[in-house]
Structure formats: structure tokens, C-alpha cells
Amino acid sequence: MSGSSPVCSSVRPLWPPLVAGLVLGLVLILTFVLVGNGVGASGTFASIAAWLGFQLAPAATESNGYLGHMVANGANPFASWIVVEVIGVAIGALLAAVSAGRFKVRVDVGAGKIGVMPRLLLALAGGLLAGFGSRFAAGCTSGVGLSGTAMLGMAGFIFLVVFFVVGLAVSALMRRVW
């Protein structure tokens, strides 16, 4: 079986950006209609923190102004719509990657200017900064950016402009190292 793909014999092409954007817009509309909320993801990590905090220090978590409402009166932080959404996104992404023959566990090395471990550490640091920023801004790219602008919220528009400007600046800086 050497040389054969463990998942699929052929790799299907990626969706055209216009089609992907239209589908994302339809998903956003459906989440507003069916669930009553827009899309989002970063709230899941707050739910995990609330659950973990409640397991380790219940009294401190219940009295915490940020996490307390998630565990008040015996509430289960994992019963939140946003946790179910993120689990669904992860399962859907896995199924899509497998069905398209694109599922691989690997670290992309790009131009190879830095090694794998520094690349992973930079990715971790970037993810932690993005996670902190999303909680600080009361939402992530999908929550504030997509759902916020869909509701014509000024914060959503400001977020998207700043997000792209900072993204372009960091991209130009990291291109030299990455």
C-alpha cells in the first residue's frame, strides 16, 4: 500500500471565495434565525475556564464577576449554545477535510527560515494573544466581526478595519522571519 493516500485517492479543489462567502453568510443568517445568536467561538474558552475554575475552586469561581454567572445555581457552562457551535464546527471541519482528501497532520514550514519548534511557539503566542484580545474586545473575529457587522454594529466595522490593518502590518513584519 505504499504511495496510497490513507484517506482519499484524490484531492478535491477548494471552494471559490465567492461561494464560500455566500455560504458563510447563509450560515450566519441561519444562526440568527434558528438559535437567536450570531456566530462566535471565543466564548467557548470562557466556558471551559468557568468549568475548570468551578472544579478547582467553586467558591472563587461563583463569586468571580466574569465567570460566576456561567456556574450560578448549578448551571453547566458546557450547555451553552456557543460550546455546541464550536464542537459542531470542529466536527464539520474534520468531515470536510477528510471528504475532500485534504486531512493531514503536519506543520507547514513555509520558506523554512525558522525551525518547526520556533514556528509552533510563535503560533502558540499568537493564539494566546488573539484569545486574550477576543475576550478583551468581548468577542472574536466571527462574533464581533461577522455577527457585529451583520447587525450593523459600529464596533463590528471598527473591529474589521483594525483587524485587517494590524493583520497586514504583522504579516509584513513576520514575512521576514516566517
Image (cartoon, rainbow, N blue to C red):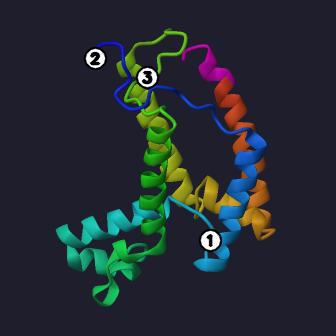
Q: Is 177 included in the stretch rendered in magenta? A: yes
Residue type for callout 1: Thr
Q: Is 57 included in the stretch rendered in magenta? A: no
Residue 126 in the image, given as x and y percentages of width and height: 49, 37
Mark 1 Cα within 10 Å, few/some/many (few <14, many 20+)? Answer: some
Disc 3 is placed on an element classified as: helix
Which one is in front in this view, the residue at disc 2 or the one at disc 1?
A: 2
Mark 2 Cα within 10 Å, few/some/many (few <14, many 20+)? Answer: few
Disc 2 is placed on an element classified as: loop
Q: Quadrant of residue 134?
A: bottom right
| Residue plotted at (45% across, 47% down) | 95
Rounded to the nearest angstrom, the CA distance separating label 3 from label 2 is: 33 Å
Label pair 2/1, CB-CB below 8 angstroms: no
Q: Give the answer, above or below, for where 70 lies relative to 86.
A: below
Residue found farthest to the bottom: 73
Label pair 3/1, CB-CB below 8 angstroms: no
Residue found farthest to the left: 56
Q: Nearer the viewer, residue 146 or 119?
A: 146
Q: Give the answer, above or below, for where 2 lies relative to 87.
A: above
Q: Which mark is residue 31?
A: 1
- Residue receiving disc 3: 119
Rounded to the nearest angstrom, the CA distance separating label 2 from label 1 is: 44 Å
Q: Which mark is residue 4?
A: none
Which one is in front in this view, the residue at disc 3 or the one at disc 2?
A: 2
Residue 40 in the image, given as x and y percentages of width and height: 56, 62
Label pair 3/2, CB-CB below 8 angstroms: no
Q: Quadrant of residue 167?
A: top right
